[in-house]
Amino acid sequence: ANYRRVTCPDGVNTATNEACCVFFALRDDLQTNLFDNQCGEDVHESLRLTFHDGVGFSTTGAFAGNGADGSIILFSDIETNFAANAGTDDGVDALSPFLTRHNVTAGDLIQFAAAVGLSNCPGAPQLQFLAGRPNATIPAGDGAIPQPQDSVDSILSRFADAGFSSNEVIHLLASHTVARSDTLVPGHQAVPFDSTPFTFDTQFFLEVLLKGTGVPFGINNTDGAEVDSPLPNQGEMRLQSDFALARDSRTACEWQSMVDNQALMNQNFFTAMMKLSNVGQDVNSLIDCSELIPSPAALTKKEANFPAGTNASDVQQVCSSTFPTLSADTGAPTTIPECPDGDINLADCPS
Ligand code: HEM
Ligand SMILES: [Ca+2]
Ligand SMILES: [Mn+2]
């Protein structure tokens, strides 16, 4: 092995490969000017882009597209108009200016932003980052990205065509532990999928298994994308796709296995993200710049808990393995933070 490091043109940083040098300034720029060093909205939207860029790929040729190639940015006029990509224009608009300030490709920008951003989320794994994806030459085809109203059959077969097993689909959905919808509930933005949308914990896998009792704000989404959540009065929503995947016999055990098992969830997510980030790419021609990805903060609260007002009798268990024994929060209803600093009022979030 060659352990020599190169000194970067900035005269300050050193790297294992000269190709990694350009990412130091990009990292600082993203952290300071977009992410605020926090696990906020722009991090979540950058992470979502890895999916909407990467899954634009088909092993059978059913859909055009070359995977994780930055096409959702480079052909944003086309791709952000696809129904499945509703809301992705925010992430595209946020990241695009960084392409003019830094000499990187759009595909690398999406993957790098997500990996750096995720490192701001307590509990997250430190993702791999490989550099060198060529810029997209064609847009992805419409229909390649699964939607929340889709059936499990349809979701699993679309992912399979993009190269992912059913287990890997469930592993990737750990991303929904730091996720909020801006488009599905009319008149409302930032509607969370779990009670800890700024923490990369296993609450999402637990809460999606709980009996649903209603929809937040009492607004019924009419297109089948949303189903009842266990915490409607706290503003939590649930996607039909997450509900169905958590209860389908093909995926229920994989889903349940990650409840209160942070180490397993993180290992699964790390490996599945490595695959998602390189869909359609010749991995051997990419250069490992993972050394640029910061080490995420640890979780302060390590165990999953039933949110106040829920308990083990609310678990809609399909998998026959023993369900973990978890304590239930007591007292007042769980308050879902609206800002990464824990503030409960969206209007007070630092921007
Ligand atoms: C069955 C597959 C999936 C479906 C149907 C799905 C659907 C959705 C929907 C409808 C939203 C809300 C968008 C909005 O209204 O703003 C969302 C948010 C999100 N998704 Fe997924 N998703 C899937 C898989 C994934 C994957 C594989 C990833 C990444 C690895 C991902 C990451 C995210 C993130 C981070 C958000 C939150 C964005 C934000 O808070 O602004 N999703 N997803
Ligand atoms: Ca969470
Ligand atoms: Mn959002």
Image (cartoon, rainbow, N blue to C red):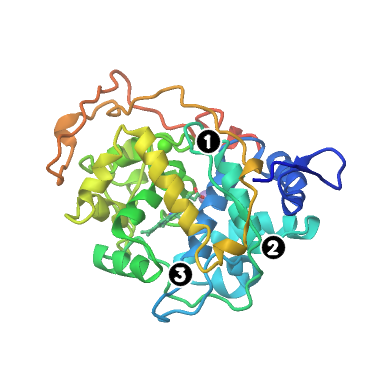
Q: Earlier in the sequence, mark 3 or mark 2?
A: 3
Q: Residue at x 17, y 30 (%)?
A: 312
Label placed on residue 121: 1
Q: Position of residue 207 (x, y in %)?
A: 29, 38
* Amino acid at dot 2: Thr
- Between circles 3 and 2, the one closer to the viewer is 2
- For the residue labelled by badge 2, is the local secondary structure a helix, a strand or a loop? loop
Q: Position of residue 244 (x, y in %)?
A: 24, 55
Q: Residue at x 20, y 41 (%)?
A: 211
Q: Position of residue 177 (x, y in %)?
A: 41, 42
Which quarter is ligand 1 in? bottom left
Q: Which residue is mark 3?
A: 83
- For the residue labelled by badge 1, is the local secondary structure a helix, a strand or a loop? loop
Where residue 259 sits, quadrant-wise, is top left
* Amino acid at dot 1: Cys
Quadrant showing the C terminus? top right
* Amino acid at dot 3: Ala
Q: CA distance from mark 3 to mark 1?
A: 28 Å
Q: CA distance from mark 3 to mark 2?
A: 25 Å
Quadrant showing the N terminus? top right
Label placed on residue 105: 2
User: Along the horizontal axis of the image, is 92 left or right of 175?
Assistant: right
